[in-house]
Image (spheres, rainbow, N blue to C red):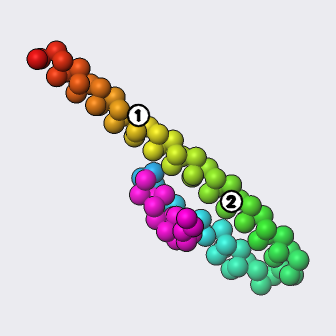
Amino acid sequence: GRITLKDFERQSSIILGERINLLVPFYSSSNNSSNKNDSEIIVELRHEIETCRATIDELETKIITCEKSQRLANGVELEYEDLLKFLYE
């Protein structure tokens, strides 16, 4: 399902243990927009959106890697427990 950008930022921050804030470039773009014409602002915002999308893709890849690593670690832990049970029975 779909989630909001804010929820994605929050969940990514928790999973990856780092502060994720995808909207900062948009705030700085809007603050600097008074000196620019509309077409310059549009080009800049399009660039920021593409950067944001790339960052989201990178975060999704990191999250998937973390989840796979966690599943692998859990699997190894279960195998280790089974091995210990076998050795001490």
Q: Around disc 2, counting alpha carbons within 10 Å, would you say few (fewer than 14), some (14 to 19), or many (20 or more)?
A: few
Side of 14 where 4 appears, left or right? right
Q: Which residue is drawn at 43% across and 53% down?
A: 15
Look at the numbered disc 2 and give the secondary structure of its residue.
helix
Q: In this view, does 17 lie to the left or right of 4?
A: left
Is 74 positioned to the left or the right of 11 in the image? left
In the image, which residues are magenta? Answer: 1-15
The residue at which mark 2 appears reads as: 53
Tell whether position 78 is magenta.
no
Give the Cα distance between marks 2 and 1: 28 Å
Element under disc 1: helix
Residue in view at x 28 percent, y 31 percent = 78
Position above or below: 72 against 89: below
Q: Does the magenta stretch include residue 12?
A: yes
- Sequence-first tag of 2 and 1: 2
Q: Which label belongs to residue 72? A: 1
- Residue 85 drawn at (x, y percent): 16, 22
Q: Residue furthest left?
A: 89
* Image x and y of residue 19, in percent: 47, 60
